[in-house]
Amino acid sequence: MSFINRHQPCRDLLRIVATASFCILLPRVSFAQEHEHEHESEGHEGQLHFAHPLFTESPSPDTKIRVDYLFRQIDTDFTEHSMRLEGEYAFTHSVSIEANIPITSRRQSGTTANAVGSGEIALKLANYGLADRGILFGGGLALGVPTGNDRKAIGSAHIVELEPYVDLGYKRGEAELVSFLSYSTAVHRHVDEPNEEEFALALSGLYHVAERLETLVEFQTERVVNGEESGRQTAAIGAGVKYHVGRIHHLVLGVGGRVPVTHERESDAEIILSALWHF
C-alpha cells in the first residue's frame, strides 16, 4: 500500500508554532516544579491556575491522571462507549506534556466493534505575564498518533494529525472563562485520501459554587475549511458539575452532558463521567 507525506504544506505552520512557543516561554523560564496542590483552582506559588473543564482542556500546565467515560448517541441505531486514559506532567509552571488514549466500543445496526482508538500527544505552553489581571494566555501543539483500527473504523492506524492551538483564560472571583482556538490537518495519509482541514473553537465557563463544588457551561464549534466536506460546521453546548472529594482536593469527580445546536452534528447526545487525580 502506498503512502505519501504532506510535510511541505505544514512547514510554514510549524515555523509559526515554534516562534510562538519561544515567545511564550521566554518571559517565564523556570526550572523548579512544586508537586503539591492544595486546590485545583489555586496557583503554583501564587501563579494563576485554572480548574479543568469536562469537555474542554485547561490552559494551565499541570501534573495529573484523568480517566473519562464518554457515551455518544450518534444515531438511532448507532452508539459509542469510550474509556479514555490521560496523563499530564508539568516540567515547569509554563510547560507540560499530555498524552491520552481511548478504548472504544461501537454498536451499529446490531453489530459491535471494539478497538483502541487514535491517541494524542500534546505540548502545552503558558504565559503568566498578565496573571495579576487574572489573564493566562498560551498555546501548544497536539499530535494525533495512529493507534486506531482502520478495519473497524475506530480511529486510524495510519493517519497522523497535526493540531496547533492558542488558548486564553480569564479568572475573576469565583468565575473562570477559558477559550481554545485550534487548526487541524492530516500530515500522513493514503494517496487516495482527501486532506481535510478544520478550525475549532471551544469555550468554557466555570463557577465555584462552594469550596468543593463547581458548575460548568461549555460550547464547541468546528468548521471544515478544506476537503470533501468543506463548509460543514457543527456546534454543541453542554453543562456539568464537578465535586472535590475529601479535604485534600486531589480527587475530583465530574459529570456532564452535551447536545448539538446545529443541523449538522457529530452525535445526537453525549454524556461524560470523569475522575481526575492531581499530584
Image: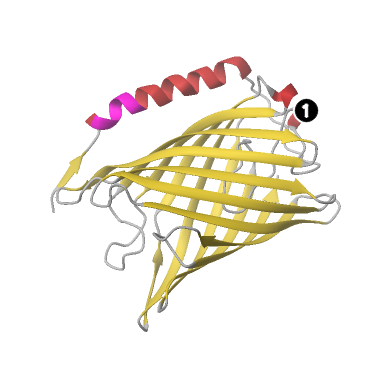
Magenta stretch bounds: 9-13
The residue lying at 84 percent from left, 51 percent from top is 210
Q: From the image, tell me which residue sits under label 1.
A: 45
Q: Main secondary structure of the magenta part?
A: helix
Q: Residue furthest top?
A: 27
Q: Name the residue: 74% across, 44% down.
A: 40
Q: Is residue 125 left or right of residue 227?
A: right
Badge 1: few (under 14), some or many (20 or more) residues near its Cα, within 10 Å? few
Q: Quadrant of residue 160?
A: top left
Compared with 208, 154 (above or below) is below
Q: Quadrant of residue 58?
A: top right
Residue 52 percent coordinates (x, y) = 65, 46
At label 1, the amino acid type is Glu
Q: Is residue 142 visible?
A: yes
Specify whether 54 is left or right of 150: right
Horizontally, is 126 left or right of 11 in the view? right
Secondary structure category for the residue under label 1: helix
Residue 11 shown in magenta = yes
190 or 227, which is in the foreground? 227
